[in-house]
Amino acid sequence: MAESALITVADVARELATQVTGGEALQTPVTGAQVCDLLSHVMARGREGQVWITIQTHPNIVAVAALARLSAIVLAHGMQPEEETVMRAEDEGIPLLLSEDSAYTLAGRLYLLGVR
Amino acid sequence: MGDAPLAYHEFPILGRAYFLGGRASTSVKRVLGEAGVDEGTIQRVAVACYEAEMNVVLHARSGYVAVSVYADRVELVVRDQGPGIEDVDLAMTPGWSSASEEARSLGFGAGMGLPNIKQHSDAMRVESTPGAGVCLLLTFQRGGTAHG
């Protein structure tokens, strides 16, 4: 547990992301992760510090991440965020990590990284 | 209720403005923090407020959220001008939704909005006038926890 507590958004970004945009809170500890494209589910089940893997790209994902106090959003499958999404992510301090990998692969790599 | 709130704020909600959704809830969260409300209560209010706000965005023309902070509780009123809810009991069923295909493709309309609100609040009243709009009244006891 002591080891996993040391994983930060910056570690996840280095491991998974081809590009990082949006907010700059990269030193936030990562407490877990979830893979989901239904916003209500993330709002209800999201826990502080989690990384959220999704293929949704519209600005509302930033509102959900901020309200649920998630540490970062990972956009899977090469999905590109909308311009407004990046602006809101900057405002709210939520990092957006972009990856070509599938949500399935990203979840596996996060798990191996020690995010449990 | 009789007693005067320690703080009161209102924030407008624009119908159909998907990209603005969450703005009002973010403002509510901020004023609760400024009012010294505990983190757990803020989180419950934030979840319920976001779901209520998105219901207005997805279904109504316009609306607002009013937040009142009391010594022992937080109250939210979310009122909209829109089609109203025909059958409130049906709308409370987890998984039931009348959201458009467009909204669903964006990850809304999971049919969890009202159930999430009920779970995260301590008292919930839905006043619906079909063809006119909905008024949602929510109470959160400060220091309380989610239900179920």
Image (tube, coloured by chain):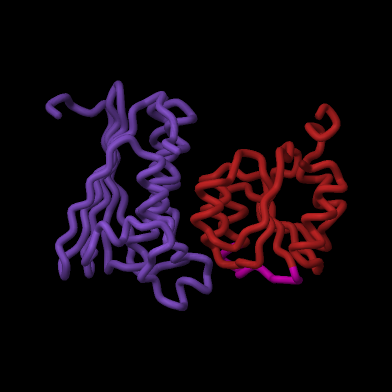
Chain colours: A red, B purple
Q: Quick one: B111 or B28, which is closer to the camera?
A: B111
The quarter of the picture where the C terminus of chain A appears is top right
Who's the residue at 44% across and 35% down the image? B146
- Residue A61 picture quarter: bottom right
Q: Position of residue B97 (x, y in %)?
A: 38, 67
Q: Quick one: B96 or B19, which is closer to the camera?
A: B96
Residue B30 vertical position relative to residue B92 in the rendered view, above or below:
above
- Is A82 situated left or right of B19 in this image? right
- Is B116 situated left or right of A79 in this image? left
* Residue furthest to the bottom: B101
Q: Is the magenta stretch mostly helix, strand or loop?
A: loop
Q: Position of residue B12 (x, y in %)?
A: 30, 55
- Is A28 situated left or right of B2 in this image? right
* Residue furthest to the top: B71
Residue B114 vertical position relative to residue B40 in the rendered view, above or below:
below
Q: Quick one: A96 or A44, which is closer to the camera?
A: A44
The quarter of the picture where the N terminus of chain A appears is top right
Q: Position of residue B136 (x, y in %)?
A: 25, 50
Identify the magenta region. A77-85
Who's the residue at 84% across and 45% down the image? A11
| Numbered circles on residues, count | 0
Whether B44 is among the magenta residues is no
Q: Position of residue A115 (x, y in %)?
A: 79, 43
